[in-house]
Amino acid sequence: MAAASKVWLVGAGPGDPELLTVKAQRLLREADVVVYDRLVSQAILGLIPRGVQLIYAGKACGNHSMAQEDINRMLVRLAQSRSRRIVRLKGGDPYIFGRGSEEARALQRAGIPFEVVPGITAAQGAAASAGIPLTHRGMARRFQLITGHFQQNQPWSVQEAALADKQQTLVFYMALGQLESIRAALLRAGRAPDTPVALVEQATLPNQRVLQTTISEMVDAARRAEVEPPALVMVGETVRLARELGGRQQKMREEQARV
Ligand code: SAH
């Protein structure tokens, strides 16, 4: 009997193809099928050899082209129909807001062997490419990754106490639709209105934009600059370091983004 199928849940990183892990690159070369997300960049899809079956399973926020349950079922079916090597390629890290763990549970329940390959999450990519360290001695002793997207129309909320510590970098994912709620929560948590905020669009990609603003200004600034997904909202003192650490090209983009 042929060996059973196996599914690899692989993180593709934030977009720059050079930020793929060595393992991810090898698996992409050796795959029979790659099931990929909307967030996987064209540059990365370009690395997949011809002849590999490519299946798009993307979701656009608010416009789900494929329900999560359908993706779970599809992965199980692909693995059961015949023996093959299936790569489920997801933006960033599969276990950070990627619903990779839901896919893992579905595979586990169906008795299909799987393995998770971590990827660089968007916050780490943006930290490096925008020059906003997640921790910095004396400035940020911790960081928090927070989702701006809640299940099925539930209003966004977060425990305000969790936002209060000034010595932390907050990184909001999927947050563009919730900027007003986030600003209100930050202010209620006692954060100063002039606390620096960066919106980082298309982090690590050639068209990355960094918009520097403040808590009080962030909603209007994002609207004026027409910030679009994928983007992160980074809040905290380390955002100030972007001017020093962001690099020359970065600064030019920043000038363009500032309005
Ligand atoms: N698993 C992914 C996150 C998936 S949720 C990870 O670990 O990065 C999707 C959200 O990730 C987007 O709405 C956006 O907030 C963020 N994101 C992903 N790639 C990004 C990028 N290149 N630049 C900015 N934000 C990004």
Image: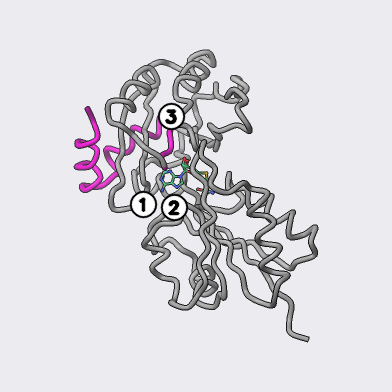
Q: Quadrant of the C terminus?
A: top left
Q: Say whether disc 2 or disc 1 marks the residue closer to the N-terminus.
A: 2
Give SS at disc 1.
loop
Picture layout, residue 51 above or below residue 21: below
Q: Any mark on residue 204, and which?
A: 1
Residue 83 is labelled as none
Q: Looking at the image, is mark 3 or mark 2 earlier in the sequence? A: 2
User: Mark 3 and mark 2: span between their CA atoms?
Assistant: 21 Å
Which span is picked out in magenta?
230-259
Q: Is mark 1 within 8 Å of ligand 1?
A: yes
The answer to whether residue 257 is magenta is yes
Q: Mark 1 vs mark 3: give the one in front.
A: 1
- Left or right of 76, for residue 18: left
Determine whether 94 is above or below 26 in the image.
Answer: above
**Circle 1: residue type:** Thr
Instruction: Where is residue 179? Give x, y as percent.
Output: 44, 24
Q: Residue at x 38, y 40 (%)?
A: 132
Mark number for residue 236? 3
| Category of crowding for the residue at label 1, using alpha-carbon neighbours closer than 10 angstroms: few (below 14), some (14–19), many (at least 20) | many
**12 or 110: nearer the eye?**
110
In the figure, residue 192 lies in which quadrant? top left
Q: Position of residue 219 (x, y in %)?
A: 37, 22
Disc 2 and disc 1 in contact, CB within 8 angstroms: yes
The amino acid on which the numbered mark 3 sits, given as a three-letter code, is: Gly
Q: Residue at x 54, y 55 (%)?
A: 57
Towards the viewer: 141 or 150: 150
Mark 3 touches mark 2? (CB < 8 Å): no
Which residue is located at x 49 percent, y 43 percent? 60
Question: What label sits on residue 14 in the rendered view?
Answer: 2
Ligand 1 has an atom within 8 Å of the beta carbon of the residue at disc 2: yes
